[in-house]
Every structure is written in C-alpha cells, then in structure tokens.
Image (tube, helix red, strand yellow):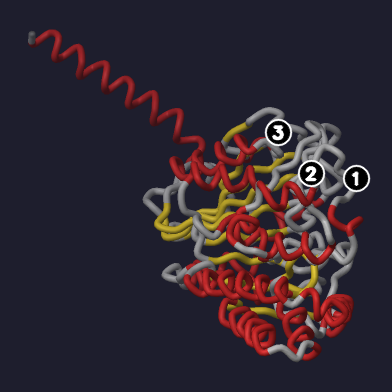
Amino acid sequence: MIKQLVHRVVIAALVAILLSSAIAPLAAEGRGKPPARADWTLMVYIVGDNNLDEYVPLDIETELAPTGSNADVSVVALADRLPTAEWSQTLLFYVTQGMEATPENAVEDWGEANMGDPQTLLDFIEWTQANYPADHYALSLWNHGWSWRPGMSMYDETDNDTLDQHELDAVLAAAGPIDVIMYDACQMATIENQATVRAYSQAIVHSQEWVNWDGIEYELVIPALQADPSMSASELAVVINQGTATGKERTYSAVALDARWDALVAAVDAWAYALEAGLPEYRYQYAGAFHGAQAFWGDPTARDLYDIASRVAERVDDPAIQATSLAVMAAVETAVLDEWHTQHYAYAHGISIFLPLTVADLDDPSTPEWNEFDYYRTLLTFGRLSHWDEFLAAYLGVP
C-alpha cells in the first residue's frame, strides 16, 4: 500500500514537472494564460479570408497589440487569412503588448477554419471562455457587412460561406451572454441586427454606413478599459463608439439592449399597425416621407428610423399616426447611448430599418439561394417581434 502511494506521488511529481516545462516557454514568451480571472475579455473574430486579408496583421499589430492584454483585460483574436498570405491557416492569439501577428506567436493553430460556419464562432467563444475567463465579455465581428441580409456578412472566401443573422442567433443562444457586441463592418446598425442579439447582450456598437479598414479603434478602447475595468457594458459601448470618430468612418452608434430597446420595438410595432391602418388614405404622404428619409451609401433600403418617423409625422395629419411616429422618435433617442455622424449624414440618428420602396427592393438577385423578404419575415428575430414586415407587405402589395 505504501509502495503504491509512493509510486503515485512520484508519477504526480513527474507529470507536474512535464507540464511545467511544457507551459513555461509559452509563459516566458507572453503567450500563456493570464494568472487569474480577468474583469473583461475582448474577443475579436477576424474574418480575413477574403479581400480584407492585408488588414488582418495591421489590425492585430497596430490596434490590438500596442496595449495588449493585462491582468484586468484579456485580448483574444481568432484570425483567418487567404491561402496566399504569409500565414494562411486560422490562428488564435492571446494578444500581448508589442506582439507580431505571426504563427510563432499564436497560442493555437486551427488549420483552415470556415469562419462563415457558426460552429467556428461558437468554438471560438467557448474556447476563449474556458481559457481566458472573465466577469464580462465583449465580441467584435470583423469583416464585410451588409445589414441583416443573408449571404453577405462575415464572408469566408475559401469556404464560400457567410455567417448569417439566424446563425449568429443560434451561436449566442448556445454560448450564453456576451455583454457587448460590436461590428467592425459596414452597414450593420439596423434594428433588425439589434433584435438578433438583444436576448444575449446589453449593448451593441455599429455603423449605419461604410466602415474603413481601421473601423473600431481598439488601440483607444483597450487602454481605456484597462484604466477602468469596472466599466459597465453601456459605458464600454460608449467608449468604443467615441473612439471610432477618430478614424475615417462616417457614422457610428452605441445602442442599449435592455428595457429601453424593448420600448423601441414596442413603439415600432404600434407605429406599423397605425401606418397600415392609414394606408388607404395616406399612401401618397408615406411615399414622400419614405423617399426623403436619410439613406446611406451602398444600401438605399436601409433608412434612418428616426428620420422616417419624423417625416411621416410632418406629412400625415392623423392623430394616431402622429402619436406613434413621435413615440418612435422618442424611443430611438432613449435607446441610443451615443451617436455621431459626418455632415453628409445630417439626418442620421444611429439606427436604420429596412424600408424597400419598390417590390424589386424586397429581394436582391445577387443571393439566389435566399428570398430575402421571406428570410426577413421567417428567420429574423425582428420579423417575429414587430408588425413592420406585415406593414411592408401591405405597402408594396405583396402577399
């Protein structure tokens, strides 16, 4: 019995020595795990296996790495590049100060991962939560974006796949709460995209417009968060949003995803019912308001929600429609935590909504695998939360 006990002690000691010798080089190089649970972990999902390939190391080295991780804030990135790049595999980085984006500095090599596969995002979130746990998490989705449309966002060229809104919904349902969601991608500041993550997040940061390669300025966000790791989700969202104003972007907004957002959806729902009831009498006035509302580069069907409601209220002399329009405007102002825009978008207020002006606008032929309006009505969370899609169908005369 004593021999067995001694044998077990010796084996345990040898295992401990082997493990410490295996882990020590990583720790010495700054690539190991943090010593304790952090206050925040920032997860950056970098989908660079496309024409954004050249910006992958730039974002890591010039925005994430200038500050890197510390005991309070862990910075973790999963980055995929084109097969022709200096490194073509999908690499996991625990970002440290001054780190270069090279395979030698990665903590894991995931081979060629399909970043458009929801399982890849789920694996990244769960791996990060297990290896770099924190009290709070923020997730940045880095790639191209085009509102809520399927087949357009988080595009992985090698695997010819995208991460669509219904897939993101499923990922977050499985992964659990992420305090802050941010889009380092174009045209994602829509009420439809907010609805996707509302049940799992407290705040979202995104742009109604085009986003330059530098997009979210992590080199400003990370040191601010490290200086005050007690930030709430809303406070961090405002810091992220204000940092974007230093780049070449044209709009950005931070929106609360709490009771204030729920009140916004309720206001839009009531507004949609009122608009539908007024269609026989006010169709002409609606058309004038809709055509004049603030639109954005690249997607004329995404128009500023506040501006639409404001123009309807001005044009339609109906008590119910005016009251519900004003309620939408007030709810937008309450839900938006922070917003900025260039003069070119003087009537932007931080949240867009799908507003097709013709039947042809309901479905973009570039994504033949989807009927986009059917997708909107059946797979988007927002379609289930509000009467807006029913109003659009009535306005455009489609079943």
Looking at the image, is mark 3 or mark 2 earlier in the sequence?
A: 3
Q: Which residue is mark 3?
A: 114
Residue at (80%, 37%) from the top-left corner?
Answer: 86
Q: Secondary structure at mark 3?
A: loop
Which amino acid is tagged 3? Asn
Task: Say left or right for 138 vs 56.
Answer: left
Residue 207: x %, y % from top left: 73, 67
The crowd level at tag 3 (other Cα within 10 Å; few <14, some 14-19, many 20+) is many
Which amino acid is tagged 2? Gly
Residue at (87%, 39%) from the top-left corner?
Answer: 368
Nearest to viewer (mark 3 / mark 2): 2
**Furthest-left residue in this view:** 1
Q: Is residue 13 visible?
A: yes
In the rendered structure, find residue 366 and report the number of the disc placed on it.
1
Q: Secondary structure at mark 1?
A: loop
Which amino acid is tagged 1? Ser
Residue at (53%, 44%) from the top-left corner?
Answer: 125
Task: Say left or right for 376 vs 359.
Answer: left
Residue 172: x %, y % from top left: 53, 47
In three-dimensional space, the C-alpha distance between marks 3 and 2, rounded to whole angstroms, equals 14 Å
Q: Which residue is mark 2?
A: 151
In three-dimensional space, the C-alpha distance between marks 3 and 1, rounded to whole angstroms, equals 21 Å
Task: Say left or right for 285 vs 19.
Answer: right
The crowd level at tag 2 (other Cα within 10 Å; few <14, some 14-19, many 20+) is many
Task: Say left or right for 30 vs 142.
Answer: left
Looking at the image, is mark 2 or mark 1 earlier in the sequence?
A: 2
Residues at circles 2 and 1 in contact by the CB criterion of under 8 Å: yes
In the rendered structure, find residue 195 and report the number of the disc placed on it.
none
Quadrant of the frame with the N terminus: top left
Residue 7: x %, y % from top left: 19, 12
